[in-house]
Amino acid sequence: MQAIPQPIANILQLARWAPSGDNTQPWRFEIIDDCHLIIHAFDTRDHCVYDLDGHPSQISLGALLETLSIAAR
């Protein structure tokens, strides 16, 4: 397994506290290199009581993006 670059590991350590409905954290990260990652987000309305119309998934993704931005500073 490839080691996660330290700057990204530090940011993700802080970002993992981003809130999401049902505390599901409907995202996964794909590390590209020392400075880049891809966020894969998932719609949880099929299996999450609080995500009736998909908007809670979108809101939690927004919270993640803001948390990542703050952590990266």
Image: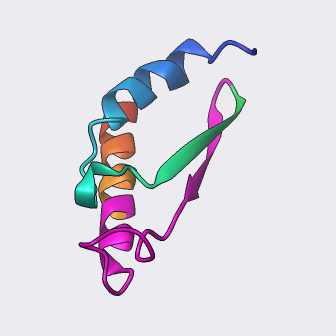
Tell me the quarter of the picture where residue 60 sits.
bottom left
| Residue at point 48%, 71% (across, down) | 43
Res. 67 in view:
yes
Is residue 11 located in the magenta-colored stretch of the structure? Answer: no
Q: Residue furthest bottom?
A: 53
| Colouring of the image | rainbow
Q: Nearer the viewer, residue 15 or 22?
A: 22
x then y, percent, for residue 3: 67, 12
| Residue at point 31%, 44% (across, down) | 67
Q: Give, as a single range, the part of the protein colored magenta.
A: 34-61
x then y, percent, for residue 29: 58, 41
* Rendered position, 72 above or below 50: above
Tell me the quarter of the picture where residue 70 sits.
top left
Res. 73 in view:
no
Tell me the quarter of the picture where residue 12 sits.
top left
x then y, percent, for residue 24: 35, 51
* Rendered position, 70 above or below 44: above
| Residue at point 25%, 61% (across, down) | 21
x then y, percent, for residue 59: 30, 69
* Rendered position, 2 above or below 32: above
Total labels drawn: 0
Is residue 59 located in the magenta-colored stretch of the structure? Answer: yes
